[in-house]
Amino acid sequence: MGDLLSTGWEKPEADMYAEVAERRGVPPERILRETESTNTSQNLEFSRALLERVGIRARSIVIAVKPFMQRRVWATHAVVWPNMQATLASPQMTLEEYFTEDLDPHKIVNIMMGDLQRVWVYGRKGWSAPQVIPEEVTRAYERLKRLGFTRHLLAEG
């Protein structure tokens, strides 16, 4: 389920996405919900266990993510479920298109900073495949950090 207070959400994202799927015509009995994970690694682990529990032997999976999460999720998949063929799916959009009334530029940049930091922190911990971060990305990260975009950063990173 994760820490709902930190997201500002009143229910697990699995329930929110299930509601969207149902509104778009997916029968509720065809939707499996993994609501216990608190991070991407657990989400993959617990989803695999859920499929096994209900007797589904998947040959491939689609992982739907926010555009800026692709690299971290792909690296996590490589460690957590490396033998499962997977496709990442996210909307093709510009950064400006991502901004909304609820997701203003300041909030999105803070979220993206946290996600980028997790790419190398999780790689060091073995939770995801290590990634090479281009020097210009590291410099931009450090500059944004100095400017105060630190709300979603881990204390250890």
Image (tube, rainbow, N blue to C red):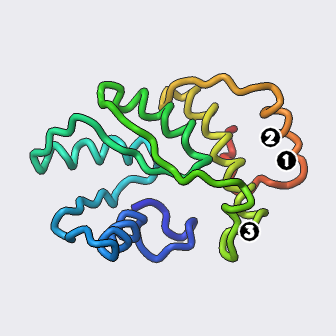
Amino acid carrying label 2: it is: Tyr
> How many numbered marks, from 0 up?
3
Return the residue at label 3: 104
Q: Is residue 27 left or right of residue 20?
A: left
Is 112 or 3 nearer to us in this picture? 112
Is 81 or 67 nearer to us in this picture? 67
Return the residue at label 2: 141
Using the image, determine if residue 45 lies above or below residue 8.
above
Using the image, determine if residue 153 lies above or below residue 97.
above
Residue 108 at x, y = what percent? 70, 59
Using the image, determine if residue 146 lies above or below residue 136.
below
Return the residue at label 1: 144
Amino acid carrying label 3: it is: Asp
Residue 41 at x, y = what percent? 42, 41
Q: CA distance from mark 1 to mark 2?
A: 5 Å
Amino acid carrying label 1: it is: Leu
Q: Quadrant of residue 26?
A: bottom left
Q: Nearer the viewer, mark 1 or mark 3?
A: 3
- Provide the secondary structure element on which disc 3 rests: loop
Residue 61 at x, y = what percent? 31, 41
Q: CA distance from mark 1 to mark 3?
A: 16 Å
Q: In which quadrant will I find the N terminus? A: bottom left
Using the image, determine if residue 8 lies above or below residue 120.
below
Q: Nearer the viewer, mark 2 or mark 3?
A: 3
Question: Residue farthest to the left?
Answer: 55
Q: CA distance from mark 2 to mark 3?
A: 19 Å
